[in-house]
Image (tube, helix red, strand yellow):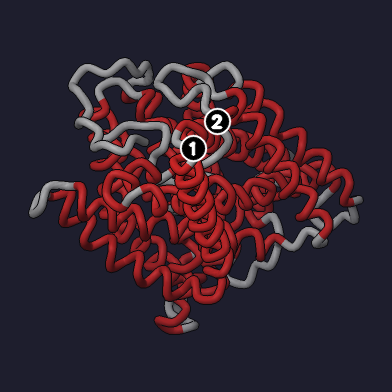
């Protein structure tokens, strides 16, 4: 994040992550924990037509993912979207985008831990057993340990771990679909539109959470070899992989469980129906693999962004170390850990109500997207494929902002904080000049 325009990425780049590991990071960032709950939630909202919801969000995500790929491949920097925004719109707007992701999107971190812990507990004690909340909290916190330790050794190590985790995840998704397919009944797809097209729209809103994550990888784009080639190809591979995975899972969810499942751990019920003996343990393993993978990529993104924000003076200079490619942002990672712990405590105090945390996460993410797409329209070559994708994305994100509604109050507060920091810095600069 510099005040002058960054040069486009060179063909030879000092980053160490090649196409395979880059693709693994993208798939993990986007596929994520949505597979644990979203297929069942979408089936309840839209019925069998939830298949259309998945397909619609997949198509809509293509221009958004393509735009981020175009920006990240040209301007690979730890600041990610904040870098793009600074180049196009200035420091205050960049500070807003940085705060939205670093403080706002991070609210979703404890949600990921709790969701995974619920699956593990359900596998051990049974889906409907009464389990003390403290046990869920302890398991949720322990799940954070592996990705934090791995990220302390740098993105090269975390990228290798992610390759293994993503490989396991893909094999598991294929296994779940193959295992449950014999239990599928075509009759469950009738009626196809029980809640009309409004139900399909509700399913689309749910799956926005599933197909988010393209912005996270922009923060580690500087770690990729040959960004111009690697990032677009990794993005394309991730779109295809995630799209096929969600379509397949949505099909078997409707065909096996129907559209009235109300379980907090629906994927467990899906596999348990086909494999009642060992199915729950398989799903518990899936939950752990998915969660560690998501935390692995997002912790790397948060830490890299935090160091870049420190480098630019948006956060204390103390956490700036680690913003360059190949460096490890351990101080920023420590700050991220403290922030996540605070959010975990808030989640406990509020009685494990995940909904507000999810809504804050998504509203801040949409706000990041909005500034990022506006920046893309200004930075990318006019009339190019990337520029057209950015224009389309601006329209799409405008619709998402409308859907976010009053939940945008949190991004508004963080934006105000960014403006106040700007005012403070200008007054401090003037006093220094006068002195």
Tell me if residue 299 comes above or below residue 133 in the rendering: above
Q: Secondary structure at mark 2?
A: helix
Residue labelled with disc 1: 313
Relative vertical location of residue 169 with respect to residue 197 in this rendering, above or below: above
From the viewer's perspective, is 409 left or right of 212?
A: right
**Can you give x and y, in whole percent of width and height, for residue 125 in the image?**
85, 46
Report x, y in % for residue 130: 90, 56
Give me the residue at 43% from left, 53% from top: 211
Q: Which residue is mark 2?
A: 317
Residue 148, percent from left and from top? 65, 27
Residues at marks 2 and 1 touching, judged by CB atoms closer than 8 Å: yes
Q: Residue at x 91, y 51 (%)?
A: 132
Where is 90 relative to 253, above or below? above
Q: Which mark is residue 374?
A: none
Q: Nearer the viewer, residue 423 or 106?
A: 423
Depth check, front residue: 335 or 213? 335
Mark 2, other Cα within 10 Å: few <14 / some 14–19 / many ≥20: some
Of 217 and 138, which appears nearest the observer? 217
Q: Is residue 428 visible?
A: yes
Identify the secondary structure beneath mark 1: loop
Quadrant in the picture for the N terminus? top left
Q: CA distance from mark 2 to mark 1?
A: 6 Å
């Amino acid at each position: 994040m510099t005040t002058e325009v960054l040069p486009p990425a060179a063909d030879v780049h000092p980053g160490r992550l090649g196409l395979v590991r880059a693709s693994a990071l993208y798939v993990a960032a986007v596929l994520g924990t949505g597979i644990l709950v979203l297929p069942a939630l979408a089936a309840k909202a839209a019925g069998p037509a939830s298949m259309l919801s998945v397909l619609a969000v997949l198509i809509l995500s293509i221009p958004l993912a393509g735009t981020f790929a175009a920006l990240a491949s040209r301007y690979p920097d730890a600041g990610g979207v904040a870098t793009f925004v600074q180049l196009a719109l200035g420091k205050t707007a960049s500070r807003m985008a940085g705060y939205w992701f670093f403080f706002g999107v991070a609210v979703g971190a404890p949600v990921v831990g709790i969701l995974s812990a619920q699956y593990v507990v359900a596998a051990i004690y049974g889906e409907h057993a009464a389990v003390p909340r403290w046990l869920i909290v302890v398991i949720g916190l322990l799940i954070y340990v592996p990705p934090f330790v791995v990220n302390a050794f740098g993105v090269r190590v975390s990228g290798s771990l992610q390759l293994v985790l993503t490989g396991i995840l893909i094999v598991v998704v294929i296994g779940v679909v193959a295992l449950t397919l014999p239990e599928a009944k075509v009759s469950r797809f009738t009626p196809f539109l029980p809640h009309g097209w409004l139900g399909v729209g509700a399913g689309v809103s749910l799956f926005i959470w599933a197909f988010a994550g393209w912005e996270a990888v922009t923060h580690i784009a500087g770690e990729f070899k040959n960004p111009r080639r690697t990032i677009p190809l990794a993005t394309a591979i991730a779109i295809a992989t995630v799209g096929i995975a969600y379509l397949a899972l949505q099909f078997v969810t409707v065909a096996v469980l129907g559209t009235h499942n109300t379980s907090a751990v629906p994927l467990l019920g899906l596999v348990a129906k086909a494999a009642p003996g060992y199915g729950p343990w398989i799903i518990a393993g899936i939950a752990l693999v998915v969660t560690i993978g998501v935390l692995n990529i997002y912790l790397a993104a948060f830490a890299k962004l935090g160091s870049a924000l420190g480098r630019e003076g948006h956060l204390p200079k103390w956490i700036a170390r680690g913003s360059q490619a190949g460096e490890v942002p351990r101080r920023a990672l420590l700050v991220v850990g403290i922030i996540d712990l605070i959010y975990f405590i808030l989640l406990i105090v509020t009685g494990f109500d995940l909904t507000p945390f999810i809504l804050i996460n998504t509203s801040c993410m949409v706000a990041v997207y909005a500034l990022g797409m506006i920046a893309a329209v200004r930075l990318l070559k006019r009339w190019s494929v990337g520029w057209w994708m950015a224009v389309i994305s601006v329209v799409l994100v405008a619709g998402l902002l409308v859907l976010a509604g009053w939940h945008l109050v949190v991004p508004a507060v963080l934006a105000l904080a960014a403006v106040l920091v700007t005012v403070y810095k200008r007054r401090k600069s003037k006093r220094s000049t006068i002195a």
